[in-house]
Amino acid sequence: KVARSADKLLCQMKNQSQLRTVDGSEKPFSSLGWANFVPSKPLQSWDKRQGGKSFKTCAVVSSAGAILHSGLGEEIDSHEAVLRFNAAPTEGYEQDVGTKTTIRIINSQILANPKHEFNTSSIYKNIMLVAWDPAPYTLNLDKWFASPDYDLFGPYVEHRKNHADQLFYILHPKYLWQLWELIQSNTQETIQPNPPSSGFIGILTMMAMCDKLHVYEYIPSKRQTDLCHYHENYYDAACTLGAYHPLIYEKNLIRRMNVGSERDLRQKGRVTLPGFSTISC
Ligand code: NCC
């Protein structure tokens, strides 16, 4: 039941993950007038399944230490869109991670913790931002609004008011738990109901928004290391294998969907995935 072929898996992902953001149509957001300050161009505008216009080629760049000394910068920059995570910088690491950033997926800590300087740091400017926070599994939006994991709502509203032109979305928790279900339904073990990592969320989001994508150093290459991030001198194997997030299961799933070669995986840490719009189920 659990061992599915790549095609079946891809179809399951395509059919059971509906890209969705907080758009102000539901309570409590509707009563608070959110419909007026979320971007008028929805994230679904890039999802061909929902009538949008997708990116042709995309790169997803994990923050893993193993990308150091990869020399992949130029290759990464050659994609139409590049997705990065949280506070991962490009400055000083251009040779290995590239210079281009089109979208950043940020968890709610980035918005809530002053150390990230969300309002002033240049890494969050002139790009598309997609934030997430793990709502209760029950999807009670009132509860979520009253007590998110880290307070992202205040900073989000503030940022929307000051930078109305910047595309900035909050993923709908329903979407996050759909992704979790996809991981669980393809895993023999029982997984804790903790949300997927930004990495998995970013990959699935890009499968909805791109015709083709390359994911770098999410599945470790031959450069695998305990160095947590390429930009930080901190060592912990859990960054790669997981503690809170069901990382090992996410990664198994992505590995099983890879349509690229084993050589690219080993040498570059590169997985190739088709966009949802290009697969017929
Ligand atoms: O570390 P983080 O993740 O920002 O990494 C982004 C994504 O890259 C992949 N990754 C990272 C390191 C590594 N050695 N191997 C990897 O495969 C993962 O897919 C990861 O999701 C997150 O997912 O949001 C996370 O965020 C950090 C932290 O909140 C932010 O970096 C902001 O400082 C979390 N760390 C802590 O809370 C201490 C991490 O658990 C998950």
Image: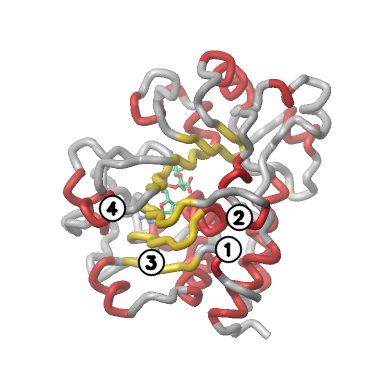
Q: Tell me the number on the disc at residue 148.
A: none
**Observer-nearest residue: 39 or 92?**
39
Q: Which comes before the other along the chain, label 2 or label 1?
A: 2
Q: Quadrant of residue 90?
A: top left
Which residue is denoted by mark 4 in the rendering?
A: 78
Ligand 1 has an atom within 8 Å of the beta carbon of the residue at disc 1? no
Which residue is denoted by mark 2 in the rendering?
A: 48
**Is 86 left or right of 204, judged from the image as shown?**
left
Q: Amino acid at mark 3?
A: Ile
Q: Which comes before the other along the chain, label 1 or label 4?
A: 4
Local crowd at mark 2 within 10 Å, few (<14), some, or many (≥20)? some
**Observer-nearest residue: 197 or 277?**
277
Mark 2 → mark 4, Cα distance in angstroms? 22 Å
| Image quadrant in which the C terminus is located | bottom right
Local SS, label 3: loop
**Is 165 left or right of 29, judged from the image as shown?**
left
Q: Quadrant of residue 8?
A: bottom right
Mark 4 → mark 3, Cα distance in angstroms? 21 Å
Local crowd at mark 4 within 10 Å, few (<14), some, or many (≥20)? some
Which residue is denoted by mark 1 in the rendering?
A: 277
**Observer-nearest residue: 17 or 188?**
17
Q: Residue at the spot x=71%, y=21% of the render?
A: 36
Image vertical order of residue 199 relative to residue 127, above or below: below
Local crowd at mark 3 within 10 Å, few (<14), some, or many (≥20)? many
Q: Tell me the number on the disc at residue 219.
A: 3
